Image: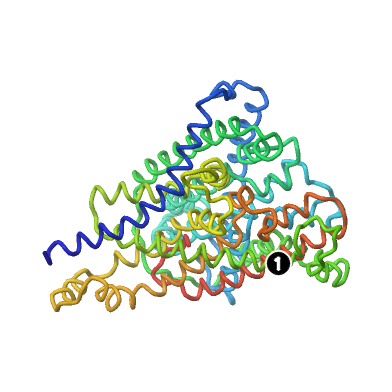
Amino acid sequence: MDKYRPALTRAALAVVPLAFLAVFFAYPVASLVGLGLGGDGPGLGLLTDSGVRHVLWFTVWQAVASTVLTVLVALPGAAVLARFDLPGRAVIRALVTVPFVLPTVVVGAAFLALIGPDGLLGIELDRTVWAILAAHVFFNYAVVVRIVGSVWAQLDRRQEEAARMLGSSRFAAFRRVTLPALRPAIAAASSVVFLFTFTSFGIVQILGGPEYATLEVEIYRRTVYQLDLSGAAVLSLVQFFAVAVLLALDGLLTGKARASRLVEPAPRRPRGRLEWAFVGANLVVLVVLLMAPLAVLVERSFANGLGSWKALASSDSSSVLPVPAWQTVATSLQYAVIATALAVVVGVCAAVVLTRPGRLGGVFGLLLMLPLGTSAVTVGFGFLVALDEPPLDLRDSPLLVPCAQALVAVPFVVRAVLPVLRAIDNRLREAAAVLGAPPLRVWWRVDLPLVWRALAAATGFAFAISLGEFGATVFIARADSPTIPVAIAILLGRPGEVNSGQAMALATILMVLCSVTLVVLDRLRPSNAGGEL
């Protein structure tokens, strides 16, 4: 019986994530399929509509343009942070990552304060595609810096130096030696950026206006404003299929990529005027591109002195929010704590199961990653159509929002914990088991002391994701219990200086909460972890 105990333990642990995925992912998606393709709905015939074709075309081309621009702008920044030893380098790395952990609705609000009506720059670019592209570059800059930079820092410099000694110019050595070695990392970063911009919602919703809409925004509009649930379901299925194809292509391309020989990172101080000028120019880009929108956000929250901040506590009947804005902070924190606890329990159970290699483990891992590739709007819409009637009537349950947020956070927990669990020498576990320790004690005494830093970092990341989640929450949040991102969207959707000021103040609070979480996360992140998280 003892020899079957580990297998039985893993099987029992697998039940937790499988049940969670079945109830909160598979069932809502299946309900979407039924709603979109069954009944008297338009079905796939909706795709012949010229308006829908325009949305599809805009979704694709803006994602391509955003990806190309992000890679071009962020590659020099990745080189600076990967190759050079600068004063405050760790702080700069943390600041670069701040925009990526911000909710997209906050990013939209920041750009609205910068280039919107009465914006600081005095030019009105909101309701244009340029504002959307700039905000996408701002949001995804850290993806390229982290993914490409982590590889760039470990490339062997001697190969490029050898090319220079053989007569190649600096640019030729980069093009013939460094760039081919970076190509797999650039492809991986590009696919992630394309996926995020293809499913962009908060940024386009705030900056795009009625002329520009991605599939995510169109699904939201049809559901909330037109009550066209069947049409929204069809578009959700189209997006789900497109994302699945993108993930399959990404797996195929990155799976065939050949890895270069990596060495221990050895950053050095810049040498000569050219290198110092390169570093200085990129630091200016970092300040202008990344810090300016965040600084303007804070400045606009104080445009009326402390008036906007005092208004957060007001319960004036003329307010567009059903509750004082301060209560949305408490609601968000409460939801985020519950969602984080759910995500950590489900994610750790899944990671423990996945530590044992095998064909079933590969299928199980793919199932776990599916919510990561599914848009938050699709998740929220699936909850809306599937979990508001028997046998699962959860529409009044306070757990509905945390469950949706946890579904989005679980894949990140698995990605953070699994590599560390796999790195633990299995002989330690076997030795403890031989000495009579049951599986739970083996985990407590062997795994937990080695994995706790990664687990703490995953907890912080799940908390930040849950705190800023907008796409799914906007569908299912109760009207009397909005979260911070939902309240910001409501306030920005109403005219008036008071509403705008409160939105900026709430966005500042959310930015500070996410930034503090990020700093703590960076301190807890294991030194041998990759740069993706």
Q: Position of residue 452 (x, y in %)?
A: 39, 74
Question: Is any part of residue 102 visible from this angle?
Answer: yes
* Towards the viewer: 370 or 253: 370
Instruction: Name the residue beneath numbered marker 1.
Output: 327
* Towards the viewer: 166 or 507: 507
Q: Residue at position x 79%, y 62% from top?
A: 502
Q: How many marks?
A: 1
Q: Residue at position x 56%, y 22% from top?
A: 40
In the shown orientation, is residue 446 left or right of residue 25?
A: left
Q: Secondary structure at mark 1?
A: helix
Q: Position of residue 157 (x, y in %)?
A: 42, 63
Q: Is residue 309 above or below residue 69?
A: below
Q: Position of residue 404 (x, y in %)?
A: 52, 53
Question: Is any part of residue 195 visible from this angle?
Answer: no
In the shown orientation, is residue 23 left or right of residue 362?
A: right
Give the quadrant of residue 218: top right
* Towards the viewer: 193 or 361: 361
